[in-house]
Image (cartoon, rainbow, N blue to C red):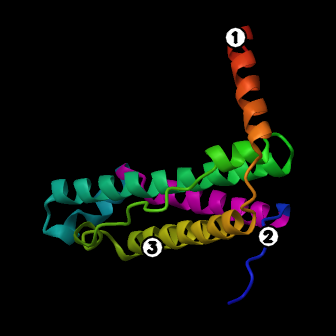
């Protein structure tokens, strides 16, 4: 089995740029005012069924991309020294079982929308593999003293109102 590459700034920046482009495509594709007019005839003229299918998949797909971008932003912050590895490990997780599109609803959507949804699912799966590789490769957890220091600093910040 090939060894997993470490996460480095170049990999994260490349994935981040890809995520931004993909997110913009998702936003444009799910512009409801334009998409419903184009596809109402594909479901026998019942616009409500098309609207529900499009809305559900739009929400699922945009949320998937928001989670992906948040993960990438956390890694960018870590690589820039803005957050610690402890904070990244604690707060920079991807949901491993993020729901995929429902086949019944996918059948109601236009082929270009289905392709875009599948692309976002594949992108998210890539991020999961990168995250898993990083977590298993760098499995050194902070020492008890480091965890205690972190908790103490959080308490101090809370008390002084930072």
Left or right of 61 on screen, residue 157:
right
Query: Which tag, 1 or 2, sits closer to the chain's start?
Result: 2
> What number is the disc on residue 6?
2
- The residue at which mark 3 appears reads as 118
- Left or right relative to 159: residue 95: left
Report the residue at 56% width, 56% height from top. Answer: 94
Q: Nearer the viewer, mark 1 or mark 2?
A: 1
Q: Principal SS element in the magenta part?
A: helix
Q: Nearer the viewer, residue 8 or 150?
A: 150
**Residue drawn at 72 percent across, 88 percent down:** 2
Q: Is residue 34 left or right of residue 138?
A: left
Relative depth, front residue between 66 and 29:
66
Q: Range of the magenta residues?
A: 10-32
Q: Residue furthest right?
A: 81
Is residue 112 rendered to the left or right of residue 91?
left
Helix, strand, or loop for circle 2?
Answer: loop
Q: Position of residue 148 (x, y in %)?
A: 74, 32
Number of the label disc, if any, that sits on residue 159: 1
């Amino acid at each position: 089995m090939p060894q997993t590459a470490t996460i480095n700034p170049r990999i994260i920046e490349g994935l981040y740029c890809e995520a931004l482009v993909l997110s913009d495509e998702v936003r444009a594709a799910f512009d409801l005012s334009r998409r419903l007019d184009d596809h109402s005839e594909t479901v026998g003229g019942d616009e409500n069924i098309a609207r529900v299918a499009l809305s559900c998949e739009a929400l699922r797909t945009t949320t998937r991309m928001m989670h992906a971008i948040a993960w990438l932003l956390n890694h960018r912050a870590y690589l820039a020294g803005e957050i610690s590895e402890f904070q990244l490990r604690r707060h920079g997780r991807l949901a491993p079982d993020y729901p995929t599109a429902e086949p019944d609803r996918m059948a109601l959507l236009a082929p270009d929308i289905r392709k875009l949804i599948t692309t976002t699912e594949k992108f998210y799966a890539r991020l999961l593999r990168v995250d898993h590789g990083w977590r298993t490769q760098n499995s050194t957890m902070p020492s008890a003293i480091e965890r205690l220091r972190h908790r103490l600093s959080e308490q101090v910040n809370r008390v002084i109102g930072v």
